[in-house]
Image (tube, grey):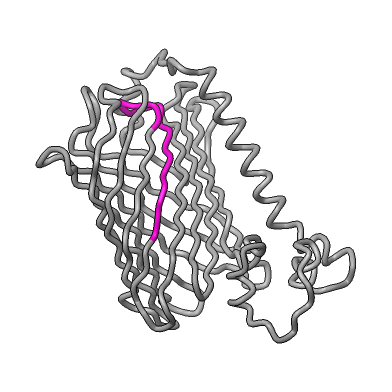
Amino acid sequence: MLSVSPHSRKDKKHLRGYAPPTMKNTTRSYCLVRGLFLVWLGMLSLPAWAASGKGMETADAERIILGQPEDTNADQSELLDRRNSWLLGWKGSVELGMNGASGNNNRFNLRAGLDAERDSEKYFDKLSLTYTYAQDESVKTQNWFRAEGRHDWKFDDGNPWRVFITGIYEYDDFQDWNQRITIGPGVGYQAIKTDRTDLLLRAGIVGTKEFGGSNNAWTPEADLGFDLEHKLTERQTLSVNYDLYPSLKDAGPFRMTTNVGWQIDIDPETNMFLKLGIEDRYDSRPGPEKNRNDLNYFATIGWSF
């Protein structure tokens, strides 16, 4: 099984016949997200497509598409920092995992993701999209989407400090809420930066608002977290992303998200990789008749770009 939620079978009887109250809005949101995703992939592939048709390098095609003059003395980092070059310098990956059965047992599980980042001398940008869906005996048991973006402003060269603003959007059919947004500023500290290890510590203050739940008011929260990436071997990489959100409104309540991934490069020529991971979301106050923990473990195949 490639993408599994341990609570699926436990909640099946309770969920039988369940239908989200905002199905029309859900369908519109799905179509919008799918459209944006396809546009995003098309934008990323445009320079390479143009290059293949003209017999030139991808970087030259990017320069022509963006209307930039040829500058052989320009540093790549300087190019990335220009206001009209936001499309340049992105790298990332897409991944997909699914499994299912039909016959005596009918089930289907799907997980899809897109990760992209852009690093330059002055800025760092990060985008992450994740979608999981599962059904068992024609009963939907999981439907969750998360989009996260972050923009960092770096200080002078050699200074490990930075400031950032982050935004997160979530949709989940099986929470006390239907949609949730989190947005706010923070500071980061580059604790380790080597060829093998990258560790960024983060702290900030965010505002969180839920829609369609028992508490729809804005909630101020602290955001304490870190991003770790360590290269185990030339073809294996371990990554850990952690965020703790203690409430600043009431003492005691908190949320926590943990994502651990082990990526193994299968074919460097095609940039194909296998990823095994565990994803845990914890809420000390999940709402009536809801579990505090949502744990997913998964295996996906992906391609880097």
Can you give x and y, in whole percent of width and height, for residue 169 in the image?
43, 40
Residue toward you, 35 or 208 = 208
In the image, taking residue 285 as reference, residue 129 lies left or right, namely: right
Residue 152: percent from left, percent from top: 43, 63
The quadrant of the rendering that contains the N terminus is: top left
Return the residue nearer the eye: 159 or 261.
Answer: 159
Q: Can residue 1 be seen from the camera position used here?
A: no
Magenta portion: prevailing SS class: strand
The single residue placed furthest to the right in the displayed view is: 54
- The stretch in magenta equals 164-179
Residue with the most extreme bottom position: 73
Q: Is residue 279 left or right of residue 157?
A: left
Can you say whether 279 is above or below 214 in the image? below
Q: Please tell me which residue is depicted at 47% across the width and 28% down the height of the picture.
A: 135
Residue 175 vs residue 150, the one in the foreground:
150
Looking at the rendered structure, the number of numbered marks drawn on it comes to 0
Q: Residue 7: horizontal and vertical position, in percent?
A: 31, 33
Image position, residue 239 (x, y; %): 39, 65
Residue furthest out toward the top: 17
Horizontal placement of 44 versus 239: left or right?
A: right
Q: Residue at x 72, y 50 (%)?
A: 42
Quarter assignment of residue 176: top left
Image quarter (top left, top right, bottom left or bottom right) of the C terminus? bottom right
Q: Was residue 171 drawn as part of the magenta stretch in this picture?
A: yes
Going 40% across and 60% down the picture, which residue do you hit?
261
Residue 137 visible (yes or no): yes
Which residue is located at x 68 percent, y 82 percent? 74
Q: Residue 272: within the magenta?
A: no
The answer to whether residue 89 is above or below residue 22 is below
